């Protein structure tokens, strides 16, 4: 792909200080009783700077009211000033903390733009969270459950175009114990240079204050199969789209995520700043 060739030849995998990469992705989730959530996330990465902004829309009125309405929230990491900023565009407020403050708190930021339910928080995660997840995964899959696990997996030979990337589709049907059938479809591209740049920039900044970067699984199907100790063929590359659905009449849960765009462009300092009209507060509600 032209992006990969350009970066490899011009920057040797390191973008210049006059360049930034911008990525947009959309996630949609439907669940019984709570309705539909749509999250549009835009990420910006440049040397010493990272920003993630998410717009959350909730379709059901009562759920929307209970969660404080639709929101546009974000996090900015500034390696030049060693400052972490969280902001709420709807309330026009922001709060900030220094990297030194985070270091003194064992690498855990004190300010949150949104709770863990929406997978926000500045790309960092506590060590206690990681340990809890490991314990839950190990305890949730007994020998009797594993004996009732079923799965089938199809890897497409042909490639599809997903937002300009050649991607291979993988379809996995998975049933664990007495749970319903989960159908997961994922698309992977091996053209991963720009994605790696995002990871490198964010990881470097989070590492600089002693934090732990929060990662989604590279593949949801492979993560589930690994936890269930199933053998499977892995697909190389980076996921650019997935759909997940429970085939259970009483459940009705589904989730879909897709990369909409990723592009290299000229560096714009304003993409890593909050608007002057925003009011500084001690912390966001």
Image: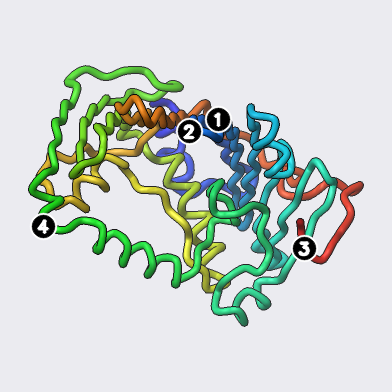
Quarter assignment of residue 18 = top right
**Badge 2: few (under 14), some or many (20 or more) residues near its Cα, within 10 Å?**
few
Front position among marks 3 and 4: 4
- Judge whether residue 263 can be spotted in this image: no
First-in-chain label (4 vs 1): 1
> Residue beneath label 1, please?
35
Please tell me which residue lies in front, 244 or 176.
176
Residue at coordinates 77% horizontally, 63% vertically from top-left? 283
> Residue beneath label 2, please?
31
Dot 3 lies on which element? Answer: loop
Q: CA distance from mark 1 to mark 3?
A: 29 Å
Left or right for 151, reference 48: left
Q: Position of residue 75 (x, y in %)?
A: 66, 52
Q: Quadrant of the C terminus?
A: bottom right
Residues tagged 1 and 3 counted as in contact (Cβ below 8 A)? no
Q: CA distance from mark 2 to mark 3?
A: 30 Å
Q: CA distance from mark 3 to mark 4?
A: 46 Å
Q: CA distance from mark 2 to mark 4?
A: 30 Å
């Amino acid at each position: 792909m032209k992006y990969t060739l350009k970066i490899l030849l011009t920057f040797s995998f390191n973008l210049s200080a006059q360049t930034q990469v911008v990525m947009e992705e959309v996630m949609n989730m439907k669940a019984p009783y709570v309705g539909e959530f749509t999250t549009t996330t835009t990420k910006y990465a440049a040397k010493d700077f990272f920003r993630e902004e998410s717009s959350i829309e909730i379709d059901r009125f009562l759920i929307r009211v209970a969660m404080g309405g639709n929101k546009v929230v974000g996090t900015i990491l500034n390696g030049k000033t060693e400052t972490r900023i969280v902001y709420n565009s709807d309330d026009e407020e922001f709060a900030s903390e220094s990297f030194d403050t985070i270091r003194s708190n064992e690498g855990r930021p004190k300010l949150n733009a949104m709770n863990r339910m929406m997978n926000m928080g500045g790309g960092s995660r506590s060590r206690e969270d990681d340990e809890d997840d490991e314990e839950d995964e190990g305890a949730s899959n007994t020998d009797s459950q594993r004996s009732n696990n079923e799965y089938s997996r199809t890897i497409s030979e042909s490639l599809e175009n997903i937002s300009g990337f050649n991607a291979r589709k993988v379809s996995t049907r998975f049933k664990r114990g007495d749970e319903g059938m989960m159908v997961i479809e994922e698309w992977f591209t091996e053209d991963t240079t720009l994605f790696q740049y995002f990871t490198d920039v964010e990881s470097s900044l989070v590492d600089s204050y002693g934090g732990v970067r929060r990662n989604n699984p590279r593949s949801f199907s492979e993560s589930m199969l690994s936890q269930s100790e199933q053998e499977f063929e892995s697909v190389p590359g980076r996921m650019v789209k997935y759909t997940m659905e429970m085939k259970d009449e009483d459940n009705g849960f589904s989730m879909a995520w897709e990369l909409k765009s990723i592009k290299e462009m000229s560096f714009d300092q304003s993409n890593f700043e909050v608007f002057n009209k925003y009011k500084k507060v001690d912390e966001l509600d």
